[in-house]
DNA sequence: CTGAAAGCGCTTACAG
DNA sequence: CTGAAAGCGCTTACAG
């Protein structure tokens, strides 16, 4: 009963031919019966299916793929699956894929361009039906590779969503960023800092753009010392916030590129003996689950990560069924007000 | 240049035959040249490879798999990829797999037994070379399915690692739990609570076992009101901690099933206006990255998540190359002392 | 309704 | 060193 795996691997799996022999029909008929084709007599079909079930038969997706030239498979390439934003997006992709009987290959590039190229190449060899690239920082570097590929690709929050790639889904960075800054202005803040992400090519500049234009429109002079850059992680948030805290005149509020950066900023502020939001207000971006559990709970811009993942898969599915409209979808962010932002000192709520 | 995907999909990919025609050799020779077989003349091999490169040829892994009956693929099934513990484990698996040119299928069961069964079945049809199941809660339910499978499986922190499954890698729950409780005892705590996970079949009972036996050995009477159960998430930690805080006599320290539970406990304590660790000490389990950024930073038991993932893949690799030793690996946890635990009131450090 | 035949894109003995 | 042949496990016209 408990044979060793290598012993077992010697035993050949049952194929359609074996079932055919047992059922006394041709393997064509078995194939049809298993596909529930109406072309085969009901009783024989039943019998065949029963025999298949009893013998633990499992059709070979690889053989099927070879003839149909569809693998019902997609490749997902991420910069880091350990990044909570990415993990939630992948959960959404996977869920949608699963519902449509697609399997997903996951590849973590670790933000290494070479590895990303290698991985995309391996997806080509696996003959995936489509690819989704999530939050890649290096997209531009392998653009030529992608553009010559014969596989539909959809980019999700990619740093280089432009030109040659027809299909992308992106958070509406500028508007989302503006809503965060408008909220801060409404609370009475006038000295608002921005902690960006030095690796976020387009998303950082868009979020920064929203920050700057909103400040401009409010008639506030741009103060370059209030703009610093982290790395999108908590440690980068700590460092960046420390630089801000060394300023002769502190900001009363800080808008962060993402929640992890905000978590770091929170820590740096605490380390200096200051309090959020009484001394400094903080606003994040993403709305990770942990944003509800920071101290204080984080006011942030929500990205519908799970839905964005599903959407990416839906776009892919549409492309796969032949639709060929160019798809560049912008998803709105939503400001989630919690407790990390409040009016600055001396201003009533 | 920018043809539509469906137009493109009509254009057949180059096959080994196309290359053969261009190179004026047989497809057998092309196959050999591409595999860098020493059997083929060096100059012809060079020429063939060049032609292949120029024509953007990509070998079909599916065709190759059909003949070699190896897919160089593995399936990873997880309860939830959005769980930070799981995500880090998967990162480790993926990294090790990548280094050995394996591709990984990821399936998220959402802790749904039916889905888990469906997914494992699809992995069988895809002819994955191996499967790793991570932190499954429902393993027992599909034990029969697994045991009749012809594919090697390794279980990682599975709730039912026993009997029929030869290969598993597990954190040393009992010892890790004991080290946490011993630390708390050394700090002077005598009234120590435990917030478990009602879904953690074996890991919860093992961690509880470590808790209880260490208390016993210290001569402390077991107080059942000090043991409550969450769901492994922050919300469950909040609820459970609230129940503890309603006790007529509060615990001075709480050992939590995992870090997310601890994060919830931290929040519940803060909501009651109490402080950690001055009023109550908290110890977690996992050492997620966020454990460094809670307020206060969390004292916790580290699981080497990334390494455990790599290890799982290594075991699989070993099984695939024929080794057939039963592998049940126990990985030690490590107590990471930060700031969420301190001597109870009235006891000097 | 059923079967024989061809073919998907490779690998690999077998013969030269 | 090279090619013709067989075969991996399926699907699907084509003929009956």
Image: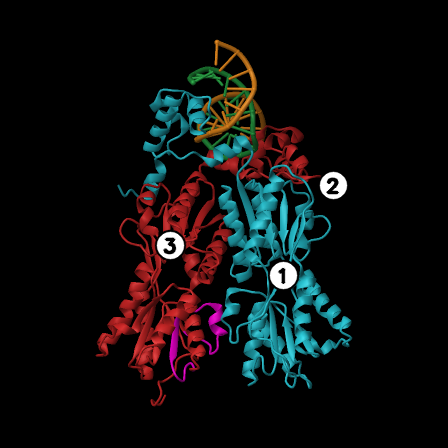
Chain colours: A red, B cyan, C orange, D green
**Residues shaded magenta:** A275-299
For mark 1, name the chain. Answer: B
* Numbered disc in front, either 3 or 1: 1
Residue B105, x across and y down, in percent: 52, 47
Q: Is residue B173 above or below residue A178?
A: above
Label 1 SS: loop
**C-beta proximity under 8 Å, tags 3 and 1:** no
Q: Assess whether residue B129 is covered by the magenta stretch.
A: no
**At x 42% / y 81%, what residue is drawn?**
A276
Q: Which quadrant is home to the N terminus of chain A?
A: top right
Q: Which quadrant is home to the C terminus of chain A?
A: bottom left
Label 2 SS: loop
Q: Which residue is mark 2?
A: A1
Name the quadrant containing residue C9.
top left
Disc marking residue A136:
3
Disc marking residue B245:
none
Q: Is residue A294 above or below residue B40?
A: below
How many numbered marks, from 0 up? 3
Q: Which residue is mark 1?
A: B333
Residue A289, x across and y down, in percent: 49, 68
**At x 46% / y 77%, what residue is drawn?**
A297
Q: Is residue C9 above or below residue B161?
A: above
Work out whether residue B83 can be spotted. no
């Amino acid at each position: 009963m408990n044979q060793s795996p290598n012993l077992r691997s010697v035993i050949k799996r049952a194929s359609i031919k074996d079932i055919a022999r047992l059922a006394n029909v041709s393997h064509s008929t078995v194939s049809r019966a298993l596909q529930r084709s109406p072309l085969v007599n009901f009783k024989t079909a039943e019998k065949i299916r029963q025999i298949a079930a009893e013998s633990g038969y499992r059709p070979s997706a690889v053989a099927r793929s070879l003839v149909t030239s569809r693998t019902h498979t997609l490749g997902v390439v991420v910069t880091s699956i350990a990044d909570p934003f990415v993990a939630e997006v992948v959960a959404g992709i996977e869920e949608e894929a699963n519902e449509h009987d697609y399997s997903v290959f996951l590849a973590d590039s670790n933000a290494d361009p070479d590895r990303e190229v290698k991985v995309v190449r391996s997806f080509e060899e696996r003959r995936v039906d489509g690819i989704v690239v999530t939050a890649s920082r290096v997209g531009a570097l392998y653009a030529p590779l992608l553009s010559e590929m014969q596989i539909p690709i959809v980019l999700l929050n990619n740093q280089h969503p432009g030109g040659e790639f027809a299909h992308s889904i992106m958070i509406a960075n500028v508007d989302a960023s503006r809503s965060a800054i408008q909220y801060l202005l409404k609370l009475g803040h006038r000295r608002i800092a921005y902690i960006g992400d030095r690796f976020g090519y387009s998303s950082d500049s868009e979020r920064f753009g929203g920050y700057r234009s909103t400040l401009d429109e409010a008639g506030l002079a741009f103060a370059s010392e209030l703009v610093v850059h982290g790395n999108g992680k908590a440690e980068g948030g700590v460092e960046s916030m420390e630089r801000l805290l060394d300023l002769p005149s502190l900001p009363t509020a800080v808008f962060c590129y993402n929640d992890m950066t905000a978590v770091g900023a929170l820590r740096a502020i605490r380390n200096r003996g200051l309090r959020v939001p009484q001394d400094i207000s903080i606003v994040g971006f993403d709305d990770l689950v942990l944003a509800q559990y920071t101290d204080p709970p984080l006011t942030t811009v929500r990205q519908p990560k799970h839905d964005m993942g599903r959407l990416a898969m839906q776009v892919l599915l549409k492309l796969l069924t032949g639709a060929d409209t160019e798809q560049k979808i912008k998803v709105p962010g939503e400001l989630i007000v919690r407790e990390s932002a409040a009016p600055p000192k001396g201003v009533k709520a």
